Amino acid sequence: MTFCQQAAPNAQLTSVASAFESYNIAGIVKDTPNTSVCNNIWIGGNDFNQNGQFAWADGTPMIYTNWAAGQPDLSHHCISWPAQENSKWNTEDCGTEDCFICEKYINALTTTPTSPTPPTTTIPLLLNMDLVIAIDGSSSMPTHSFNDIENFIKTLVIPPYFNSIGQGNPGVRIALVVVPGQNGAVIPASDLYTIKSKAGLLDALDSLQNFYDGSSGQKLNTFFNLVSGPDFLSSGYRPGINNHLILYITGTSTVTDGGNAAALAQSIRNNNTYGIITIAYTAQGQPAVNQNVLNSIAGANCVMISNTVDYLIQNGLDFVQTRILSAATTGTYC
């Protein structure tokens, strides 16, 4: 840690806030000359303040973890990572001589993992985007799966480029909508004005169960008409930015409220009202979805299907975050 602080202002051993950052850092390590000799690499996690309560060197709490089986071993207090293998974390004696990777903040706008040679990847800390998160609240998304999705979203927004939620321009505005079955009403749990902070988002996610419907079918056409309609677009949507996204997480490809959801979604995408990313989550014996239907809604490269929570966390985070960052830099999600 001392070497990182001496190497650059505002530098410390790197944190790993999500699966996306884990893969990103592992890629930097593998692409950096001379790191093939490293058996383990120090990262910034430790439990110096309270035994067994691990946190990052920059003071942020450790929410995302990637422990190996049997870890953490609480007889050791620092975290090392066999990053050449993109493997799991272990605790190790803090005096062990290992390689290490540092992270530094540049002008409070980017965070860059650093290594013995200059890094090749930077991650924007401040996004400027309007994000509508739509979660299936029908019988195709049982309550245990609905809870998995809430936790997935909480993990999704851990990275620091989501710290600007509700903070103006640049900043992230997030709306939450539960898409019900045929017996429910499509009512936003929050519009793009409502949520003013990351803490506010977490509180809103905790209250989403109040909007869960549990009836069969899905009112997807009604949802698309709502979020592309004038009332919703006048409630925090910013036409002056080019990063608008619907993240649609569903347990079904069946639509039961009439109309042509695919044509409506394509119109929304073609008009650049929103990009659409779809995750189908069919855990614990739920019926399979029709991927062709979902492709017609979001586009073939913007659909991911997961049938386990582990796959959702390990792959879904990277799937969504890389597309968000792509839009932040290129204007294109997929």
Image (cartoon, rainbow, N blue to C red):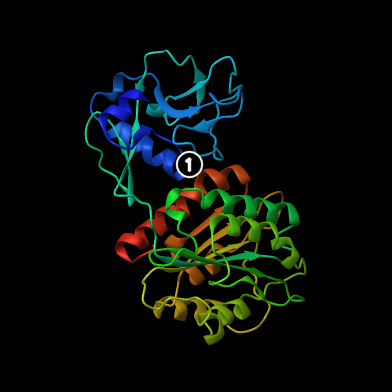
Label tally: 1
The answer to whether 219 is drawn above or below residue 285 in the figure is: below
**Where's the C terminus, which quadrant?**
bottom left
**Where's the N terminus, which quadrant?**
top left
Between residue 312 and residue 5, name the one nearer to us: 5
Rendered location of residue 166, percent (x, y): 49, 64
Between residue 202 and residue 293, name the one nearer to us: 202
Quickly name the residue at label 1: 17
Residue 37's image quarter? top left
Residue shown at 40% from the left, 34% from the top? 14
The answer to whether 63 is drawn above or below residue 177 in the figure is: above
**Disc 1 residue type (three-letter):** Ala
In this picture, residue 143 sits left or right of residue 53? right
The answer to whether 225 is drawn above or below residue 111 in the figure is: below
Rendered location of residue 268, percent (x, y): 46, 78
Residue shown at 63% from the left, 50% from the top? 151
Residue 82's image quarter? top left
In this picture, residue 50 sits left or right of residue 143? left
The answer to whether 55 is drawn above or below residue 210 in the figure is: above
Q: In the image as oriented, which residue stretches furthest toward the bottom?
A: 230
Residue 43's image quarter? top left
Secondary element under disc 1, as helix, strand or loop, is loop
